[in-house]
Image: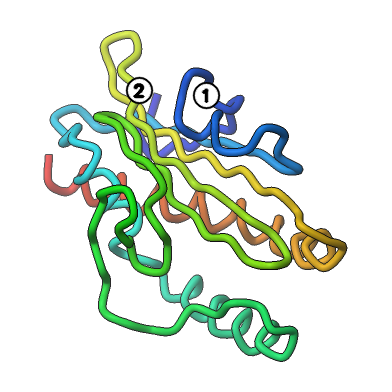
C-alpha cells in the first residue's frame, strides 16, 4: 500500500480519544502508513501533521473566523506556532488534554461544541501507522447547525494534512 493513501477507519479502542467523551455526537478516524524509515516519535509525527498547514486551509479558517465572530464563537488568530505537547500545553490554537507515548489528545471547548483530535501511532503488521481521530460533542442547537458545513471541510482538511505530513517523511527517507 502506498503511504500517501489515507483510509477511513473505526475510532481506535483503548486510546485517549475513546475516553474523551462518554457519548460523542460525531466521530471519525483516518489512518495512513508511515513510509519506511520515517520517525515514529509521537512529537515528530504531531509536528509534521500540524506544522505545515496548506494555504487553502488557512484561507478557509480566515473565512470561518469572519463568519462566526458575530455569533460569539472562539476564533483562531494567526500567531507563532506554540508547540508544548505536555497536558495543559498548546499546539497552535489547540489545548493539549492528554498524552501517552504513542498518542496526543488535543482540542477545544466552546459554548456551542467541544471537540478532541487525537494523533496516534499504531505499530501493526511490521509497519507504523498514524491515525487521526476526531470526536465532537454538541452543547446546543448552534453546535449542530455550525457543524453541518464544517463536517464536510473537516474531512478534506484531515486527509490533506495527513498526506502533507507523510510527504515530508517520504522526502526525508
The residue under the point 26% across, 68% down is 82
Outermost residue, right direction? 141
Q: Where is residue 9? Give x, y as percent.
A: 58, 27
Q: Are circles 2 and 1 on residues that touch, CB within 8 Å?
A: yes
Give me the disc on residue 122: 2
Q: Where is residue 7? Give x, y as percent.
A: 54, 32
Q: Is residue 45 left or right of residue 76?
A: left
Please name whichever residue, 99 or 48, is drawn nearer the observer in this view of the structure. 99
Other-residue count near label 2 (Cα within 10 Å), few / some / many at <14 / 14–19 / ≥20: some
Please name whichever residue, 151 or 43, is drawn nearer the observer in this view of the structure. 43
- The colour scheme used to paint the residues is rainbow
Image quarter of residue 149 = bottom right
Quarter of the image where the C terminus is located: top left
User: Measured along the vertical axis of the image, is residue 12 above or below residue 148?
Assistant: above
Image quarter of residue 55 = bottom left
Q: Label 1: which residue?
A: 12
Amino acid at each position: 500500500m502506498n503511504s500517501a493513501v489515507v483510509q477511513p477507519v473505526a475510532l481506535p479502542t483503548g486510546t485517549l480519544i475513546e475516553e474523551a467523551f462518554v457519548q460523542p455526537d460525531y466521530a471519525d478516524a483516518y489512518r495512513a502508513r508511515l513510509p519506511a524509515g520515517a520517525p515514529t516519535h509521537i512529537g515528530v509525527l504531531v509536528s509534521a501533521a500540524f506544522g505545515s498547514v496548506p494555504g487553502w486551509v488557512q484561507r478557509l479558517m480566515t473565512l470561518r473566523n469572519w463568519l462566526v465572530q458575530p455569533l460569539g464563537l472562539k476564533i483562531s488568530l494567526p500567531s507563532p506556532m506554540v508547540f508544548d505537547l505536555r497536558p495543559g500545553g498548546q499546539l497552535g490554537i489547540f489545548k493539549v488534554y492528554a498524552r501517552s507515548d504513542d498518542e496526543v489528545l488535543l482540542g477545544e471547548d466552546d459554548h456551542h461544541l467541544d471537540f478532541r483530535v487525537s494523533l496516534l501511532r499504531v505499530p501493526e503488521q511490521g509497519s507504523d501507522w498514524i491515525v487521526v481521530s476526531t470526536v465532537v460533542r454538541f452543547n446546543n442547537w448552534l453546535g449542530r447547525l455550525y457543524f453541518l458545513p464544517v463536517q464536510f471541510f473537516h474531512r478534506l482538511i484531515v486527509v490533506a494534512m495527513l498526506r502533507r505530513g507523510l510527504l515530508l517523511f517520504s522526502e526525508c527517507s
